[in-house]
């Protein structure tokens, strides 16, 4: 039986050998912090994907805010559905460019594990209160390194950990600009750019659903370039990224491939992003919800910073225990905990 399973691994290794010469491969991975016996039927990035998918932090994403806090309706995007959309878009690009789809998927599924309750609002409050500052990408890495698996961490490969840490962009995005940052693998770059494709389009859908905007109110110059529906826009963006990143296929071994958009598509996407900031992210209705969320996170932090004996036993690091606990909370749990403690 073991011999048959080892044949599975050999088959998968042969498939990896046929990937682009610019692809990251399990066989040349920089490895894990703790050496492990190889799986007989999965390559290293597959194991990482599975560990992320089955961890508690991934499950909690289903009750964490993407943009709209505690929305009424079953079809608004959560942090979990956002993650799945990023994963699917990223896998499509990775497969088309003959890069490592397993690595791309693992990074995508793990990239937002460190998000707080109430989305970026919660992140901003923790960043203000926590002496060391707080960024969700750094917390995502802390989760997979230190907090999951009863404090043992998931012991992921360097490539997945790097992709998770480096996926984040500045909040005011200049796509592929000087503040874009750089991932260490093309698969990590795919996750970074797929994150934008996913959230711009589902945030438009949610804003239309919430009646903040209408499809007709989108900037006409952006709609003319990208399309007049979610499916058209995603198809335009994904197709453009693939074509503009063609060197990643490895047909020219002397190329220096990158994952990017063409200038017209990039500019249209930035117009849409600016529109969302003005009409949705910074709207008076969104800000009202955000203030309630801010008050909740602020109250929880202040309380547990003074009552550390009431923290769950798994949060033991004195430097991080309060922020680790609050960042792990879902929206509903944070509200319930605050009300139970009479903080609101």
Image (cartoon, helix red, strand yellow):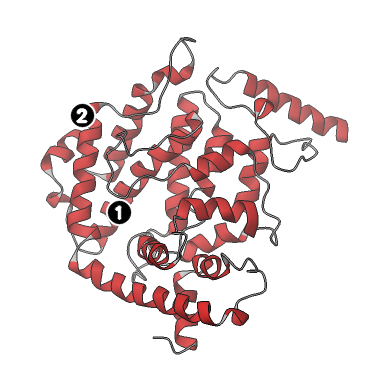
Identify whether 233 is placed above or below 114. Answer: above
**Label 1 element class:** helix
Q: Please provide percent x and percent y for residue 166.
A: 47, 41
**Nearer to us in this view, 286 or 164:** 164
Quadrant where the N terminus sits is top right
Q: Is residue 329 left or right of residue 31?
A: left
Query: Is 156 placed left or right of 258 in the picture?
Result: right
Say which quadrant the C terminus sits in.
bottom left
* Furthest residue toward bottom: 342
| In this rendering, position of residue 41 left or right of residue 91 | right
Q: Nearer the viewer, mark 1 or mark 2?
A: 2
Q: Residue at x 83, y 31 (%)?
A: 4
Q: State the residue lying farthest toward the front.
A: 131
Disc 1 to disc 2, C-alpha distance: 21 Å
Instruction: Say which element carries label 2.
Output: helix
- Residue 264 got which mark? 2
Q: What residue is shown with label 1?
A: 203
Rate crowding at label 1 as few (under 14), some (14 to 19) or many (20 or more) other CA atoms within 10 Å: many
Q: Is residue 120 above or below residue 170?
A: below
Q: Residue at x 43, y 34 (%)?
A: 182
The percent position of residue 295, horizontal first and vertical second, equals 35, 77
Q: Position of residue 247 (x, y in %)?
A: 42, 17
User: What residue sits 24% from the left and 73% below the top?
Assistant: 288
């Amino acid at each position: 039986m073991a011999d048959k399973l080892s044949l599975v691994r050999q088959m998968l290794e042969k498939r990896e050998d046929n990937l682009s010469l610019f692809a990251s491969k399990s066989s040349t991975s920089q490895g894990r912090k703790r050496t492990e016996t190889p799986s007989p039927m999965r390559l290293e990035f597959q194991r990482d994907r599975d560990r992320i998918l089955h961890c508690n932090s991934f499950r909690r994403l289903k009750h964490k805010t993407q943009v709209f806090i505690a929305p009424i309706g079953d079809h608004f995007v959560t942090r979990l559905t956002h993650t799945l959309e990023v994963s699917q878009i990223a896998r499509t690009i990775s497969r088309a460019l003959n890069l490592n789809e397993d690595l791309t998927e693992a990074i995508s599924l793990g990239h937002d594990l460190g998000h707080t309750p109430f989305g970026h609002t919660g992140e901003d409050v923790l960043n203000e209160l926590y002496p060391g500052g707080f960024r969700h990408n750094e917390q995502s890495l802390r989760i997979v390194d230190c907090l999951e698996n009863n404090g043992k961490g998931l012991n992921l490969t360097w490539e997945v950990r790097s992709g998770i840490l480096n996926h984040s962009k500045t909040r005011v995005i200049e796509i592929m600009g000087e503040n874009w940052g750089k991932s260490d693998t093309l698969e990590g770059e795919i996750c970074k750019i797929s994150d934008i494709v996913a959230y711009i389009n589902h945030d438009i859908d949610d804003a239309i659903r919430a009646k903040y905007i209408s499809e007709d109110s989108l900037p006409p110059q952006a709609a003319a370039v990208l399309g007049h529906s979610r499916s058209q826009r995603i198809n335009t963006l994904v197709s453009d990224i693939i074509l503009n990143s063609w060197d990643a296929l490895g047909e020219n071994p002397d190329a220096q491939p990158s994952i990017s958009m063409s200038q017209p598509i990039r500019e249209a996407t930035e117009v849409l992003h600016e529109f969302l900031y003005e009409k949705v992210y910074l709207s008076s209705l969104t800000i009202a919800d955000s203030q309630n969320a801010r008050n909740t996170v602020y109250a929880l932090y202040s309380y547990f910073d003074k009552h550390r004996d009431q923290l769950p036993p798994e949060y033991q690091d004195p430097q991080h225990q309060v922020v680790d606990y609050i960042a792990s909370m879902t929206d509903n749990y944070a509200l319930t905990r605050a009300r139970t403690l009479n903080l609101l």
